[in-house]
Amino acid sequence: MIRANDKNIKTWIEVSENSDFSIQNIPFGIAKVNNEVFVATRIGDTVVNLYTVARLGHFDVAKDVFASCRLNDFMLLGKQATRDVRDKISDIFNANNAEAKNNVELQEALLNVNDVEMLMPVEVGDYTDFYSSEQHAFNVGCLFRDPDNALMPNWKHIPVGYHGRASSIIPSGTSFHRPKGQKKPPTEEMPVFGQSNLLDFELETAFFTYEGKPLGDSISTEEADDYIFGMTLLNDWSARDIQGWEYVPLGPFLGKSFASHLSCWVVTLDALEPFRTAGPVQNPKVLPYLEYAGDKHVDINLEVLIQPEGGEETSVCKSNYKYMYWNMNQQLAHHSVNGCNIKAGDCMGSGTISGPKEGEFGSMLEISWKGTKTVPMKDGTERKFINDNDTVIMRGFAEKDGVRIGFGEVAAKVLPAK
Amino acid sequence: MIRANDKNIKTWIEVSENSDFSIQNIPFGIAKVNNEVFVATRIGDTVVNLYTVARLGHFDVAKDVFASCRLNDFMLLGKQATRDVRDKISDIFNANNAEAKNNVELQEALLNVNDVEMLMPVEVGDYTDFYSSEQHAFNVGCLFRDPDNALMPNWKHIPVGYHGRASSIIPSGTSFHRPKGQKKPPTEEMPVFGQSNLLDFELETAFFTYEGKPLGDSISTEEADDYIFGMTLLNDWSARDIQGWEYVPLGPFLGKSFASHLSCWVVTLDALEPFRTAGPVQNPKVLPYLEYAGDKHVDINLEVLIQPEGGEETSVCKSNYKYMYWNMNQQLAHHSVNGCNIKAGDCMGSGTISGPKEGEFGSMLEISWKGTKTVPMKDGTERKFINDNDTVIMRGFAEKDGVRIGFGEVAAKVLPAK
């Protein structure tokens, strides 16, 4: 049992009933106030400057780790040290800790969330994106091939993945321009250049790794938990028209690399332990290096909303991370089985997470069934893909036994092409 | 005219006739002597500690840049500043510079190449690998499809590329283990796990970028030269059996990510300017954003040799970088046309560089024509792919008007699977 996970813990900080940031959460992020940048956590609507807390001598690790502008140095401390810090934070803000509550110096660490700018949490070294939701892979296979051959022959044997672009991963709240590129509309004989007209979101989660083993060594499914720091939400934007023309035979490239958005609070794998759940039966049986023991999936409610300029949010997808066919342990074991070295701060995307039912599909490609259906917005407009000035918002949380652990949101507005 | 490129310059440092490291080269790398790590250049067999030179006040940029363990800080200075440093180095070691030659303090910067360990030159943020040799793409198409449909429909419209793994890029001289992974031999009904039996090299060059523009902006073919720092040789190792089973539909992943080797000296694009040459006529005509003016290809002789354990080197390929269909300017313009941000230290591979004739193919896949031909070694053994304990060596140089600018070599030994 991880100490900070105890569902009976209360905090002396005010937390509203439906807050994503219960005292059992204690996520980590990078915050900025008045040009000071520091590692932070959040409890309710209070952002805690952990550099201030560290300078007061509360942690057993070097305080400079918390003065960093990215979480990588913190992650380099490894699982036990970061777990100890989370436990210590839980102790400090425990409702029974009157000494801390009355400590004037500690009050200086407490900031209102509205006074804080959240920055990119992690310096991503390598970004890998998996393709691990069966329903999504099946839907895409139906749309581009046929239902009888929807899944590729390798799909149930390998957590299929590919390398993505790290430099264009940006934090929630950063607007971006609709990408331009080369595409070949079915009506044209030759490719053309222009703005993407089929801009799409992909509902994903991402996990971030601790420093792995040296090049040449592998991480087993059993060891994988010790190498996973935490998770965020990920919107893996996709320009379907650019992607469709470029991706054979070497995979997605410019159809993805214009922007990918992360939510700003990294929820630790420790915090998500109480929400573990069983995955699907894997048939055919996987090779031994992909076998795993115990519940390694996680029950996380996910939602996607589209907010037209000046309008209300319309929910277009409710899905769940538990729908994954391949779990993080299998993904990491597969990724390193060839000896590939994993670094602190690597980002691994789940792939689009689609549930089995309509209303649970994690991309407009699937929701509009390749543009053959329209999706009504509350303001009376319709969507097949994403329009200029739309904001796409993804939210996610786990909830059980009266404890809610949420991610906040990843939201980003699409500006017109430059 | 770039000052350091003058073919008439002689140096007071001894340089043997066929040295890759003429006074017109002045490449940059990271060297280590007695636990001191510094930015270095090489003239003949003399490695020059540029941090020592900087501390003597010879450069106009902050000396700490040369105390770095990677070239990224140097690259962040931009084209003009790095060009000025190269010109200044040329002046210092010019045969006419008696003052420098007789400067006792400067002597301390001079090291014998055998006393120096060369390290990874660049911290690679993102690694992109292109697929820009027509003969290679054609050969692969013939081997896996048929000669009439060898090139994909997009190939002559797009410099096809994909994201590769940055963490496993390592410097020349670093041995590595044959990778293991999942593969599906044609004789088996189900996939199996085991060591790769079809380990291959890919003869490539790489270029490294200066800091690009912000996310959302593009670099034109005309601007591209200003964003390219220099080049190395690249051996993009490939496990053909792992790659064959995994790569549809999202591209190469574990078949590549176990190791990629770079040569240690980054030869500047400035140094290569005299060796520019015309590229092939591109038909069909490319879209305007891929058009370019002037000679943007480079005439670089390339060679691959296999050295069995304890045996002699056997040359198995002689190719040339001028055989590329797409040049670096087109690759960089394409990469950024969707707004993807390029960072200082990004690495972009050419893709396997195969020439039009037999003997010019840049991978064993092509040389052995998918294992249907054997390649004789000088020690009497034969190869179809790469054996355990083989060392694969790649060399490259440009030569014209009595000036030779070389890359040295990228060499790596394959150890048995762990």
Image: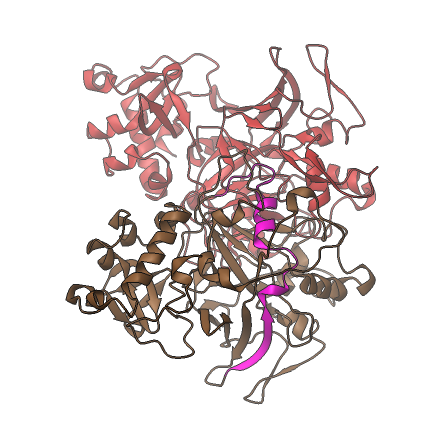
Chain colours: A red, B brown
Vertical position of residue A38 compared to residue B343: above or below: above
Q: Residue at x 36, y 29 (%)?
A: A4
Q: What x and y, as percent, mark residue A387?
A: 67, 22
Residue B45 percent coordinates (x, y):
33, 74
Q: Quadrant of residue A48?
A: top left
Residue B260 visible? The answer is no
Position of the N terminus of chain A, as image quadrant, is: top left
Which quadrant is home to the C terminus of chain A? top right
Q: Is residue A37 magenta?
A: no
Q: Position of residue A132 (x, y in %)?
A: 63, 42
- Magenta segment range? B313-342
At horizontal 29% and vertical 53% (from top left) the residue drawn is B66
Q: Give the answer, above or below, for where A291 lies relative to A131.
A: below
Q: Quadrant of residue A114?
A: top left
Q: Please tell me how many numbered marks the rendered image carries.
A: 0
Residue B315 lies within the magenta run: yes
Residue at the extreme bottom of the image, as rendered: B380
Left or right of residue A305: residue A26: left
In front of the other: B76 or A407:
B76
Give the image quarter of residue A320.
top right
Q: Is residue B336 above or below residue A91?
A: below
Of B331 and B347, nearer the camera is B331
The residue under the point 57% across, 25% down is A301
Please state the horizontal and vertical placement of residue A368, each as a whole percent of the image. 75, 27
* Closer to us: B69 or A304: B69
> Is residue B377 visible in this depiction of the protein?
yes
Position above or below: B177 against A410:
below
